[in-house]
Structure formats: C-alpha cells, structure tokens
C-alpha cells in the first residue's frame, strides 16, 4: 500500500494535521511550527493532494485507511488529530474506527453530516484555466479572477499549481478525480458515537456548522465542546490563526 507524503516538526506527543479539499500540508506550515514547540507534528498530504499519490479511488473509507497505515508505519499511539473540512471528516472517520489509537480530536469547521454540492464556481475556474498557454502564476490569478473575486481563495487554489517542466504549469492535485468523486467528499460519515474528547471550532461567518447542528453533534460526540471564532469564515485557522492556536492548545494541554 502506498504511503501518504508527510513531514514532521518538533518532538513530543503526536499531533497529525489533515488539510481540507484542494489544500495540502503546506497550508499548515506556520501553525505546524507553533504546535511543534509542544508536539511532534505530522503535516500530512491526503491522497490526490499535495505530494501524495494519485488514485482513482477517493472516499472517506480509503482516506481513513491511508491515515491508519501512516500511523502504524510511524509507530505512534494515542494520537491527537486536527482536521479541517474534508480533513475533519477523515479525522472523524478515523476516530470512529480506531478509538484505541485516539487521544484528542479537533474538527475545524465541518460536521459529520452530508452537505449539498457547492464547489461549482471553484471547479469551473480551475478547469477553465488554459495551462497550455498560461506562463506564470500571475497570469493564472488574472484568469481565475473572472470567476472568483476573492483574492485569498484564489491564492489558496493557486498553491496547487507547480512547474511540471520548464515553462509548463500543471495542477499538483488530481483535479479530474476530485471533480468526479465530489459526492463522496460531501457525504455523511456514518457512526454511532465517538467518545474521544473532541473540540469543534466553527467560523462565525461560515455555514458549515450551524447552531441547529449543536444538539446532534453533542449526541454523537458526548465529550465535545463547540467553539466559535466570531470573525472567521470557513478557513478558521487561516483567518483567525492566533485565536485558533490558543483555543486548540488549551484543549490539547488540558
């Protein structure tokens, strides 16, 4: 079985960090260094993202297996996990299947529930980039701005471009499979309850975890807290990094 690409920072108890859809471990480098002052941080690229392998198979069952294989390969136990968005669902699936390996779980701006398909504008913008003729990231940014007016979102997506060869940009993510398997990404994670100590962090300007979800979350996660970063949207760790870091550290060090 192929192993996920990862890098480590620091020493101490293990903390695995899982990025979201269209993301990579690079998105977590700055916070990873801060967490690495107290933990051995594993910054992980999930399959079809970053420097990890590409595969036509893409769902939470295989992503949980990928993470389990990595945890076993590096010989860690009683792990902590931070998962954002898609990575949060992978983390939930892992905690449900492997409670014996879990210490604490942090889920950033996602729930276990099914979500409607909602990435059409992003997918259209990425698929419409003419990478045969675009010769720089600034040209790519200019082209994507026609579909996506949010500069920060464009920069996040453009991190997935790499120089495949001299003068030729390409997507590092496996874009065709991610588009095809999008229903699997928004699907619900099925489980009874998760007894790991769990912290949900939601963005006050995001609609991924609604106040109407709180009751169901507490039923499924009996040892959970939900914390709101009032000024943040979906990318809670990027939009309010200091508050995110402080709240997660208080939880992990309790």
Image (cartoon, rainbow, N blue to C red):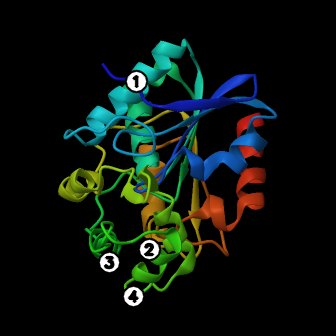
Q: On the rendered structure, is 33 left or right of 4?
A: right
Helix, strand or loop status at disc 3: helix
- 10 Å crowding of disc 3: few (<14), some (14-19), many (20+): few
Disc on the earlier residue, 1 or 4: 1
Q: Which mark is residue 3?
A: 1
- 10 Å crowding of disc 4: few (<14), some (14-19), many (20+): few
Mark 2 or 4: the one toward you: 2
The N terminus lies in quadrant: top left
Residue topped by disc 2: 140
Helix, strand or loop status at disc 4: loop
Q: On the rendered structure, is 3 left or right of 132?
A: right
Question: Which residue is pictured at 59% across the width and 20% down the height?
Answer: 78
Which of 165/90 is in front? 165
Disc on the earlier residue, 3 or 2: 3
Residue topped by disc 4: 146
Helix, strand or loop status at disc 2: helix
Q: On the rendered structure, is 173 left or right of 215?
A: left
């Amino acid at each position: 079985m192929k192993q996920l690409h990862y890098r480590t920072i620091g020493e101490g108890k293990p903390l695995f960090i899982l990025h979201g859809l269209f993301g990579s471990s690079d998105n977590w480098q700055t916070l990873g260094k801060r967490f690495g002052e107290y933990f051995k941080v594993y910054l992980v690229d999930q399959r079809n993202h970053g420097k990890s392998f590409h595969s036509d198979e893409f769902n939470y069952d295989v992503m949980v297996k990928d993470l389990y294989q990595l945890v076993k390969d590096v010989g860690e136990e009683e792990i902590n996990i931070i998962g954002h968005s898609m990575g949060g669902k992978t983390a939930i699936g892992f905690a449900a299947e492997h409670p014996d390996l879990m210490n604490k779980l942090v889920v950033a701006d996602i729930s276990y529930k099914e979500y409607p398909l909602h990435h059409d504008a992003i997918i259209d913008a990425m698929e419409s980039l003419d990478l045969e003729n675009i010769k720089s990231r600034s040209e790519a940014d200019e082209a994507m701005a026609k579909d996506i007016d949010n500069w920060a979102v464009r920069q996040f997506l453009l991190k997935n471009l790499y120089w495949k060869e001299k003068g030729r940009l390409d997507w590092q993510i496996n874009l065709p499979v991610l588009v095809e398997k999008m229903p699997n990404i928004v699907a619900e994670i099925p489980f009874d309850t998760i007894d790991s100590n769990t912290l949900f962090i939601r963005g006050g300007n995001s609609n991924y975890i609604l106040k109407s979800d709180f009751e169901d979350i507490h039923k499924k996660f009996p040892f959970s807290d939900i914390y709101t970063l009032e000024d943040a949207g979906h990318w809670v760790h990027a939009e309010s990094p200091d508050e995110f870091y402080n709240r997660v550290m208080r939880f992990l060090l309790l």
